[in-house]
Structures are given as structure tokens and as C-alpha cells.
Image (cartoon, coloured by chain):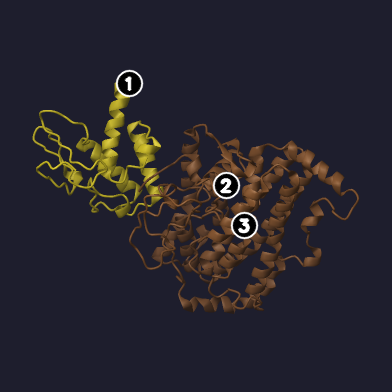
Chain colours: A yellow, B brown
Amino acid sequence: MAAVPVTCVRLTTSMQIVGKTSALKLVSMGRNKSGFPCLRTSRFQISCVAKPETVNKVCEIVKTQLALGADTVVAPDSKFASLGADSLDTVEIVMTLEEEFGISVEEENSQNITTVQEAADLIEKLVEKKNATA
Amino acid sequence: MALRMSPVTLQREIYPSYTFHQSKNLRSPKFAMASTIGSSTPKVESTKKPFTPPREVHLQVTHSMPPQKIEIFKSIEGWAEDNILVHLKPVEKCWQPQDFLPEPASDGFEEQVKELRARAKEIPDEYFIVLVGDMITEEALPTYQTMLNTLDGVRDETGASPTPWAIWTRAWTAEENRHGDLLHQYLYLSGRVDMRQIQKTIQYLIGSGMDPRTENSPYLGFIYTSFQERATFISHGNTARHAKDYGDLKLAQICGTIAADEKRHETAYTKIAEKLFEIDPDGTVLAFADMMRKKISMPAHLMYDGRDDDLFDHFSAVAQRLGVYTAKDYADILEFLVGRWKVADLTGLSGEGRKAQDYVCGLPSRIRRLEERAATRAKEGPSIPFSWIFDREVKL
């Protein structure tokens, strides 16, 4: 893991995030598969962190799939499993995301989706790729 | 939670294994193995020992049924005698493997064998892979009798216990024993397969056993067997149909006769579960949901031939492709059982029971949707060698 001193902003309720990219430093300090923190500043965009709208949409879909109450907090680093998702739920979440965003998730990638953030990041990557080839 | 959704990966637990991250890890002891008693620390080995058959990866739970429920099974022994044992066939009326094989004591024996081999020559390798896999499954019968005798309240305490449950288990085992014998002898005579490799696979499989996750509970146990018997009925029914298509009517008869046995057994087991739904609807629906959440694992999923670490996956991919046993069949069986046991009509359930009822009733369509998606994305499978057919290749 890169030893980069960063400002950590823990996002607890993603539903309240307002995406102001100019002012927002989004750092994922949680355990993600890549193992190092991602930085997004106003100067340049390294697209390894998804837009808040994407994260919100994923949270919505997860909440619907798992029939979670409106008061249940779904954070970007929430693991699907700890939200009560079984393996079937997880697959269905990915299927819904595919339909919602018009993308196709390859198996190898789908294995890496265990949290909201990971799903959102992958979605952005795939949408970008789709738009680039369109 | 890791996902793999290709049709091949849907096989491990008759068929929807929505998570398949374990498939490669079954033989790498990188995490606590069920067989490691007491230890919960992952073992890490840098090299895989040769000839290591796969092992169960889940934590093995025992005696999850509350002991007071054992009374239920004692109390319905009379009912079982009158309603379940009737599904056994008296031995004198039973078919024997010899009925379907060349008669060694007759002068026509060699001619009959020649004819059998000529018919078998017309049948493709891919069919034999499925038939061999089925035969190996049947030959692992000791594991299944063991499994029935792990169940609280109904186990055969002495090996010759006179209770209706024990009588059923022994007689069921005796009937099933003919299946493996018949298929073994047919395959031996056919000349199409490597008997030594098959026999080795059987030895490994019986040595491996299996944990169907029935936790010594007859509730879980009889739901599991209900599902299984229907699955084998469907599977053997399909191999019978295929054999007929290939022009081997005798083989079709063999598979069809085995299928008929399985149907009779399915009737018995579903009746027991129906009785449990009547006596204890809440407990039984919870058990049904529990088994479905854990997924119904195939009896031979730990199969190993000393060479292929993914033997079961490969075998079931072929079975899926040939339509002998598919993810759709899994959903169909589940839907059938939900209907058979009138799960949707259950009343007086607890909160947890209602959740279980909803889960089980909604599950078939979820599985179908999953399977449809996987089918549309199915890439053409590779051709891989199977030691059962002298390393000839079959497409997955």
C-alpha cells in the first residue's frame, strides 16, 4: 500500500453526498481490492473513484434488492454481505446494475464487487469504455 | 462476495452456485477446512500435494434440531410403517441387474456382449461422460446410507433396528445398490470407457464422503432427499431418452428402470416432508428455506480421478450442455416441491416462518432469471480430456 499522507473523509451516509468535485477530496481509505488510496482533486481526475450520483444509484439498487428500510445506512464501503446479501442477492444486484447503466459486467470483474464503492467504480469504468467506443 | 455466473459455474450445487469463488480453493488449504477439528486458523501451503481430492469447505454443523423434536419421529413410526414402507418393492418383485445384461450362463452370452458393444459404439463420448458420472454417483451409496443414519430420531441405531425408519433406510439402500451394480456392469461390457480410472474415482469419492449440510436434522435431511430423488429421476430419465435417440433401446431400458425407482423414492420422501409440514409447518418451512439458502449440493461434488482438480465442474458442464441435468431443472424441482408441499398456502407461521415461506416461493423465478442471463452469455466451452474415456476430449 502506498504510504501517502492523505486527508481521509469518511462518508457515512452516501445518500447525503452532494458532489462538488471542485471542493471534494474523495479518498477511499477502506480496504479495496487495489490496496491503495485513490485521490480525486479538482485539478485532474483519476477515474478510480466514482461520481456520487453513481454511488447513490448503486445504494438505491442495493437497498431495493435487500429490502432495507429507509433508515438503514448504506455507505460506499458497506459490504453487501454485511447488509444481509446472500450470493443470489449479489448476483441480482449486478444484474440490476447492468440493466440500469446499460453495461455488461464480465465474470472476472464481477468477482471483485463486494461493496457499493467497488460497484460504482466498475460501473463508471464500463460506462466510460462504452461511451468511448460508441 | 465473489460471483461467477457462467453456466459451468452454476453446477456445483445442483446448479446455482451464485458464488463460485471456492471452486479453485477447494484443494488449496488456504482457509479452515471442515476436517480440521477445532482449528479456525487458515493453513497456508505453498505447494499442492499430489493426488489430493477436494474437501468440504464449509463449517460442519451438527445436531441443529432441538432434541425435543426427536419425539415427533418416534410418534409417527406407526404412520411411517403404513404410509412409507408401502413404497418399497418386495425383493421377489424387484428387477435385478442381471435382467438387463447378457446372460453369462447361456450359450448366447458372447453374442449378446458383441451386440451390446456394437450398440455402445454408436453412442458418443459426451454421453458416456454423463453416464459415467451418474454411475460413480450411484456407486458412492455408502455415503448416502451413512448420511441417512446421521439423522436424529430416524437413524438405524444397530444396523438391524426394527423401527420403520431403519427398515426404510436399509431397504432403500438395497434398492439403490442395484443401480450402481447395473451401470458398472454395463460400462464394463461396453468397452467404451476406462474402467480403472472410473473405479479409482469411486474409491476417492467414497473416501471423501460428503456433507449435505443436513446437520443431523431429519427435517433438513428429508427435504434434501426429496430434492435429490427428483433430480436423479429427471437425470436418468434424460439419459434414457438420449440412449433411445442413439438407438440403444436396452440402455434406454436400463436408465428408465433406474429412473422409475428414483420416482418411487421421491414419492416416499416427499410424503415424509408433507407429514412434517402438517405436524410442524413453521419448523419445516424454516428447514426448507435453510436448505435452499445453503443450496442443494450434489452428492458427487467432491469427485476426483487423481488427475482433474475440477472433475465435477467438467462433468456437470457436459451434463448441462447435453440437457441431462441443468440449472433449469434445479428451478423446476424447487417449483415442483413448493407446489407439492403447498408452501404458499401455509398459515399460522411465525415471522421467521413467513419470511422463509416468501423466500422459498419466490426463489424459482429468481433462479430462472439468473439462468436465462447466464445462458445468453454462455461462451462456447473448451474441449477437455476426461480420464474416464482414456483422455479423449469432450466439449464442455
Q: Nearer the viewer, mark 2 or mark 1?
A: 1
Position of B356 with respect to B167 (left or right) is left
The residue under label 2 is B329
Position of B236 with respect to B99 (left or right) is left
Tell me the element at label 2.
helix
Looking at the rendered structure, which numbered label has been put on residue B352?
A: none
Residue B240 lies, in percent from the top left, at 71, 45
- Crowd tier of the residue under label 3, counting other residues whose Cα lies within 10 Å: few below 14, some 14–19, many 20 or above: many
Q: Which residue is drawn at 9% across and 43% down?
A: A7
Q: Are marks 2 and 1 on the same chain?
A: no
The residue under label 3 is B229
* Quarter assignment of residue A18: top left
The residue under label 1 is A133
Residue A25 lies, in percent from the top left, at 11, 38
Position of B27 with respect to B244 (left or right) is left
Residue B368 lies, in percent from the top left, at 50, 43
Tell me the element at label 1.
helix
Quadrant location, the C terminus of chain B: top right
